[in-house]
Image (spheres, rainbow, N blue to C red):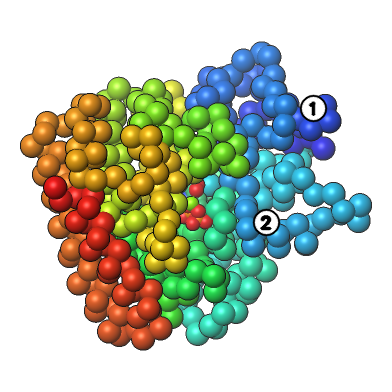
């Protein structure tokens, strides 16, 4: 099978099997520098080969978990084979970021069906909403992650239909909808309040909404531009030349901060580094043990233009489910939740800010979390089914503030 790879609506090159287990990607003869598929794979004459499976940028958005299983069952051929290239060709027309994939000779039409976000938020379908949306949106959901989720296109994009020949309409998905399974009860509300805390800590967070029944979290795509095109997005697995399976490998010092400074535009480095420090401290205080390489990313409109840190996503108090959980990556050589002292030393050695500024940052994070604890208490009062998880979250945050933010 040969797959055509598109960069921001233009054919960039061809991707196909190479040897027994590898793949190769070759840029089209007329591809220019701005057609690069990744900041790690500039346009060149020689093909980009991968010995095992797909190059990280092509693997980046492959569905995992329930969504992958669903697609495998629906599309596995009679022979029973179903590899990453098959999966990519199924969800290739609708992806996070600016790359798209089609059959070699197909055109790029990516119109995703409409689904009103307002209706979804007020839905009374109980557990069946995910199944219902899965049937309609699975094949449009080029989005990674183990938790059940789908890419949808909100109704309101309808009001933006283009005049003939214009490129202003949003043909693709506008939102990510995340659900949860019984293994992680109330995960949507958990993430909702964690994102609220992130917002209060001064971090850039896309708009997020919790459904009335607490079963779905709807998040605006941060890679969607006002003109209906999509921005480039690359996660830190890609920047570290690692596959999805290696997302838990590395340190915040090197695999996140140092790597960011290597790839970001010079004028984005200071603000982005400060935001990374804020995220590390916030994740430590909220006890998010899942802040791995795929949960940080960079964004750009033009691969040769400004490259910035992506907004915050996927923040969860994982110790509400796994009491002994630790960090996904190491800091100071350890996955233990860092102390305020360790965080301060980390920031000082890496020129994140003056000692006074670092102290103020930790204080402002503690304040943002404390304020969010009031919201959390209120939601617990109104939502009996959230009481168990919510109460655990409060205890975890309280402990996290004391050990990681206050000296
Ligand atoms: N608001 C967003 N806009 C665009 N892409 C996003 C957004 N949030 C997440 N993503 C992408 O979707 C992936 C899966 O989302 P995530 O929230 O991390 O799910 P999970 O909890 O299953 O890991 C992320 O790794 C990232 O690539
Ligand atoms: Mg994630």
Q: Tell whether circle 2 marks a residue whose Cβ is less than 8 angstroms from ligand 1.
A: no
Above or below — where is 197 with respect to 374?
above
Horizontal and vertical percent for residue 102? 71, 42
For ligand 1, tell me if the residue under mark 1 lies within 8 Å: no
Q: Residue at x 55, y 53 (%)?
A: 145
Which residue sits furthest right?
Answer: 79
- Residue at (50% x, 37% y) in the render: 249
Q: Quadrant of the N terminus?
A: top right
The circle on residue 68 is 2
CB atoms of marks 2 and 1 within 8 Å: no
Quadrant position of residue 308: top left
Which sits earlier in the primary sequence, circle 2 or circle 1? 1
Observer-nearest of 267 and 18: 18
Residue 378 seen in the current view = yes
**Image quadrant where residue 377 sits:** bottom left
| Residue drawn at 63 percent across, 28 percent down | 12
Q: Residue 210: image x %, image y %?
A: 39, 71
- State the mark number for residue 18: 1
């Amino acid at each position: 099978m040969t797959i055509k790879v598109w960069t921001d609506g233009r054919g960039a090159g061809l991707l196909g099997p190479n040897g027994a287990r590898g793949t190769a990607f070759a840029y089209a003869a007329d591809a220019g520098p701005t057609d690069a598929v990744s900041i790690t794979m500039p346009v060149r004459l020689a093909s980009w080969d991968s010995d095992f499976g797909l190059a990280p940028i092509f693997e980046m958005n492959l569905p995992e978990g329930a969504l992958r299983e669903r697609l495998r069952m629906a599309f596995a051929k009679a022979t029973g084979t179903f590899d990453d290239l098959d999966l990519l060709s199924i969800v290739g027309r609708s992806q996070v970021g600016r790359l798209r994939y089609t059959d070699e000779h197909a055109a790029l039409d990516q119109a995703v069906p409409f689904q009103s976000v307002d209706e979804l938020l007020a839905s009374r379908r109980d557990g069946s909403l995910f199944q219902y949306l899965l049937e309609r949106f699975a094949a449009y959901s080029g989005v990674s992650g183990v938790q059940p989720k789908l890419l949808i296109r909100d109704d309101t994009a309808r009001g933006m239909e283009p005049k003939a020949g214009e490129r202003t309409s949003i043909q693709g998905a506008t939102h990510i909808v995340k659900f949860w399974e019984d293994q992680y009860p109330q995960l949507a509300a958990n993430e909702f309040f964690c994102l609220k805390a992130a917002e209060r800590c001064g971090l850039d967070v896309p708009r997020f909404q919790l459904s009335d029944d607490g079963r779905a979290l709807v998040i605006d795509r941060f890679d969607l531009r006002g003109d209906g095109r999509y921005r480039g997005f690359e996660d830190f697995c890609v920047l570290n030349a690692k596959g999805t399976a290696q997302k838990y490998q590395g340190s915040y010092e090197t695999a996140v901060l140092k790597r960011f400074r290597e790839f970001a535009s010079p004028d984005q480095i200071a603000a982005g580094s400060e935001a990374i420090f804020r995220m590390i401290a916030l994740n430590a205080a909220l006890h998010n043990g899942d802040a791995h390489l795929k949960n940080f990313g960079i964004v750009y409109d033009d691969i040769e233009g400004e490259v910035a840190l992506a907004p915050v996503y996927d923040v969860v108090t994982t110790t509400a489910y796994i009491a002994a959980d630790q960090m996904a990556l190491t800091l100071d050589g350890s996955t233990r939740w860092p102390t305020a002292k360790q965080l301060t030393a980390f920031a000082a050695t890496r020129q994140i800010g003056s000692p006074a500024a670092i102290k103020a940052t930790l204080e402002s994070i503690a304040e943002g979390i404390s304020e969010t604890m009031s919201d959390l208490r209120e939601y617990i009062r109104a939502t009996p089914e959230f009481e168990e998880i919510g109460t655990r979250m409060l205890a975890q945050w309280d402990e996290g503030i004391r050990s990681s933010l206050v000296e």
